[in-house]
Amino acid sequence: MPWKGEKDPYKIWLSEIILQQTRVEQGLKYYNNFVKAFPNVHRLAKAKDEKVFKLWEGLGYYSRCRNLIATARYISKELKGKFPEKYEEIKQLKGIGPYTASAISSFAFNLPYAVVDGNVFRVLSRLFGIDKPIDSTEGKEYFTLLAEKLLDKKKPGLYNQSIMDFGAVICKPAAPLCPNCVFKKSCIAFNNNKVNELPVKEKKITIRKRWFYYIVFEYKNEIAVCQRLEKDIWQGLYEFFLLETTKETAKEIILQHLEKRKLLQKKNYKLLSVSSLFKQLLSHQLIAGQFFKIRLTKKPIGLAACQWIPVSRIRNYAFPQFINQYFRKNNGQKSLF
């Protein structure tokens, strides 16, 4: 990985933000693209939000991208481009918690702070047979203290990278390489047949289901798109006009609703198609819905919050993955209408 052994705090910070809630295989491409487009913090700080969001498109958890932009501008302007070198100062930056602050501190500045990520939780819980829930306050504090105690204070960066890699390659979540592990004689989980039981989590995730019906309005080869500005999923990204419902809704009901809101008039539109059902699973939400392609002969007044853009420019805007699925199925903007 290109960030292994990296000492530039900007690139380390970039890699850590990208890899939050993201698999390494997926994040690698994004990291390389960001470093190429924004080789230093000043370039990132000067970039337009839309350009950064477009480069981030598909990674999800877009609050990370907003925090990335805000922190880059703060470092560039207020700190004159110099990344903070102390743990507490790093942790105060927007979007940076104890884990990321520890990673930057140890990797960039060789400061003695233990990095405790999912890999480290797993290695320590199995090796020492710890059944404290890793998602509880008590569990997090316990594992953090243990990790700090075990940390090699002289080579914290090397140690942190090693234990993280060990968890990713050997002590894997599923099918760990226990027979070949150097700790197999001392690992409590392995010697007590508890490898698959550790680490422990106490919280069950409740999935909220939402129904999104996107109306792809077209008028004279232009499409109406709206930016999501409210504090919700995909904030800052673009979408088509949205009708959100609490349950699956029939085509006729959707059209009636649009007519009732004066967004459609029976003589002024043609329904071209209704897509198949699309789904996207987020961390705590399941988004399901369809796309209605509608050609207008007159622009409705109720779309004032949207902007009309040429079909040829549609892919210049950053859309959520849910809509990108639709683009891929339609082979990009060329098949929209």
Image (tube, helix red, strand yellow):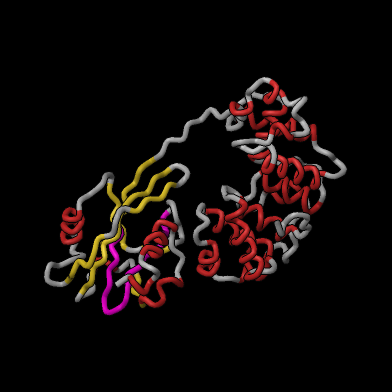
Residue at the outermost bottom position: 220
Side (left or right) of 3 relative to 259: right
Q: Which residue is drawn at 43% across and 71% down?
A: 315
Nearest the eye: 322 or 154: 322
Q: How far across and down, in percent of the image, does residue 24 sit?
A: 62, 52
Which quarter of the figure has residue 67? Answer: bottom right
Side (left or right) of 259 relative to 223: left
What span is in magenta?
214-230
Q: Which residue is drawn at 63% across and 24% down?
A: 194
Does residue 116 appear in the picture of this structure?
no
In the image, residue 280 sits, relative to residue 38, either above or below, namely: above
Which quarter of the figure has residue 150? Answer: top right
Q: How far across and down, in percent of the image, does residue 106 sit?
A: 78, 48
Q: Which residue is drawn at 72% across and 62% down?
A: 79
- Residue 166 is covered by the magenta coloring: no
Q: Residue at x 59, y 28 (%)?
A: 196
Nearest the eye: 114 or 46: 114
In the image, residue 168 sits, relative to residue 12, either above or below, namely: above
Q: How far across and down, in percent of the image, does residue 259 sit?
A: 16, 61
Side (left or right) of 9 relative to 270: right
Residue at the outermost top position: 192
